[in-house]
Amino acid sequence: MRVLVVEDYRPIRESIVKGLREADYAVDEADNGKDGLWYAQSQQYDVIVLDLMLPEIDGLTILKKIRGTDADTSVLVLTARSEIEDRVSGLDAGADDYLVKPFAFAELLARIKTLIRRKYDARSPVIEIEDLIIDMARRRVTRNDKLIELTAREYVLLEYLALRTGEVVTRRDIWAHVYDFHDDLQSNVVDVYIGYLRKKIESDETTKLIHTRRGLGYVLGEIK
């Protein structure tokens, strides 16, 4: 999924961005509040990791502005402040979770995964679509008990479609949630990767799971 990291302290920001990209998230980053607010208001994100102490515009102000127009994007606040009042202020302003510095990256990643599952109402990390099983915790995909080897990009696309099982997912949605701002992509990249997925998870002997809705997008599984 796509994550925005707004953190002015370079070592922390670079560490988070590097870790998330290694986990195959699409990541944008900003080192000040002004740029962070621009990204947040200009792009679609599944999670925003937001430091409170930022130059130009502070994190609490950014959070309030985001919540003024966007109730869906999950926001995880990072803060060096451990006082209860500061944590309460962040939650009252619309934060979905918070993490006090210093923190372990593994905990940050686990919280991000939880926020994403909550956003898409996926209570379990395992999604089953007929005989296709997607284990998001282990990043493991099987069909009819056979392991399917996917590239990182293929897996991310499949996971996003799976989180929206039965819904028509537009190419625009896929662009917004699977690729980051600086990706150098060709206009047909979504169709190409849908083709790769079909070759790997479908065959002449299996039920077709990825359906094209011409002029609209793609559906994984039966339409809701």
Image (cartoon, rainbow, N blue to C red):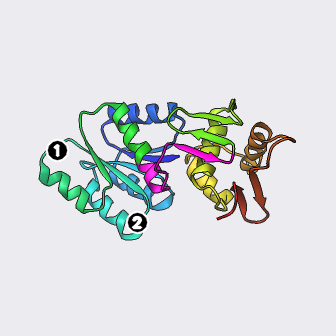
Quadrant assignment, res 135: top right
**Can you give x and y, in whole percent of width and height, for residue 12 in the image?**
33, 34
Query: Residue at point 68% right, 48% down?
Result: 130
Q: Magenta segment, which residues?
A: 115-130
Task: Out of 40 and 192, give the one closest to the viewer.
Answer: 192
Please say if 13 is above or below 90: above
Task: Out of 28 and 209, give the one closest to the viewer.
Answer: 209
Please say if 2 is above or below 173: above
Are circles 1 and 2 on residues that touch, CB within 8 Å? no
Please say if 148 is above or below 55: above
* Residue 103 located within the stretch drawn in magenta: no
* Residue 129 located within the stretch drawn in magenta: yes
Residue under numbered circle 1: 81
**In the rendered view, does 91 fall on the left or right side of 66?**
left
Circle 1 Cα neighbour tier, 10 Å, few/some/many (<14 / 14–19 / ≥20): some
Task: Out of 29 and 167, give the one closest to the viewer.
Answer: 167
Query: Residue at point 74% right, 50% down?
Result: 209
Q: Amino acid at mark 1?
A: Arg
**In the rendered view, does 203 fall on the left or right side of 30?**
right
Query: Residue at point 75% right, 40% down?
Result: 201
Residue under numbered circle 2: 71
